[in-house]
Amino acid sequence: MTRKPAKARGFSLIELILVLGLVSAILGAALSTLLEGDRVSILGRQESEMSQQLRDILTLMVKELRRAGLPPPNAYDGHYLRSSGRLNLVSSGILADSHAGRLMFTGDINTDNRVDYVEYSVSGETAPLTLTRRAGPIGDAGSLPGAPAQTLSRSVESCRFLYFDASGEATSRAAEAASVRIDLTLRSRAPDLPSGHHRTLSQSVRVKPYNP
């Protein structure tokens, strides 16, 4: 007697659902890992950019602020300046109109024997704020440089300029400041997910001008 071959048994619906569920779980885990890796990579790049920008800005500010003020007496001919009406060539250092959101000073910033005007200013009502720099040589008639301001950062969380007298006490009279403290905080361009908060990076430096 000849036996009939058994029919091949297929997958049941339940088995297919289980297999699909397992594959979906594996793919979901792999995708989640990839997305998390991308997020960490983006955050790392943002922190690196913030750190570099913070260093660049403060290095520039410190370098220029250290040259604010009168040059030593042997650097110019006082009689010539008085007789020629070129008193604007003598730097007065930190200017009286400076305040917590705006730092203005004069000095031979470029070491070219010409007095320059430098202004750092913070603008904006809420973060992110914008930090700008305007600088250039003062004209023979005392005119300030007319060049447009240079944007240093559009990702400022906060920036303050604080002034201290010779005894180290805080003062509101910027023109009499013997040192200036710069408090700068930058923020990440994009917020973290899912918190929605921006990462920040802060640094403070205190600078004694060249000859206040």
Image (cartoon, helix red, strand yellow):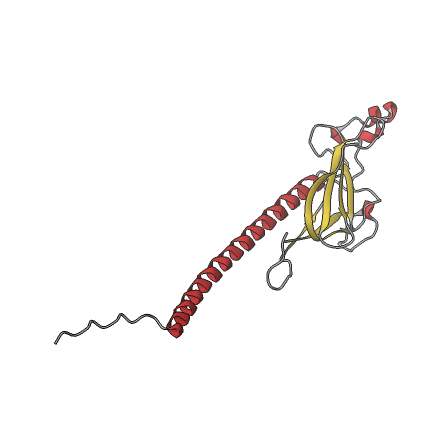
Q: Is residue 43 left or right of residue 80?
A: left
The image shows residue 181 at horizontal and vertical percentages of 72, 51
Query: Residue shown at 48%/62% (left/top)?
Result: 32
Total count of labels:
0
**Relative to 39, does residue 90 appear above or below in the rendering?**
above
- The N terminus appears in which quarter of the rendering? bottom left
The answer to which of 112 and 46 lies nearer the viewer is: 46
**Corner quadrant of residue 17:** bottom left
**Residue 8 visible within the image:** yes
- Which residue is at 41% across, 65% downward? 23
Relative to 92, is 112 above or below? above
Q: Is residue 64 left or right of residue 194?
A: right
Q: Is residue 26 left or right of residue 52?
A: left
The quarter of the image holding the C terminus is top right
Which percent across, then down, holds residue 158? 72, 54
Q: In the image as oriented, which residue stretches furthest toward the front?
A: 1
Q: From the top left corner, tell me how far across and down residue 117 is, in percent.
A: 77, 35
Task: In the displayed orientation, state which residue is furthest to the bottom.
Answer: 1
Residue 85 location, x and y as percent? 87, 25
What's the residue at 76%, 35% (across, down)? 148
Residue at 54% across / 53% down in the picture? Answer: 42
Residue 72 seen from this side: no
Q: Nearer the viewer, residue 48 or 198?
A: 198
Which residue occupies the foreground of this view, 103 or 83? 103
6 with respect to 72 (left or right): left
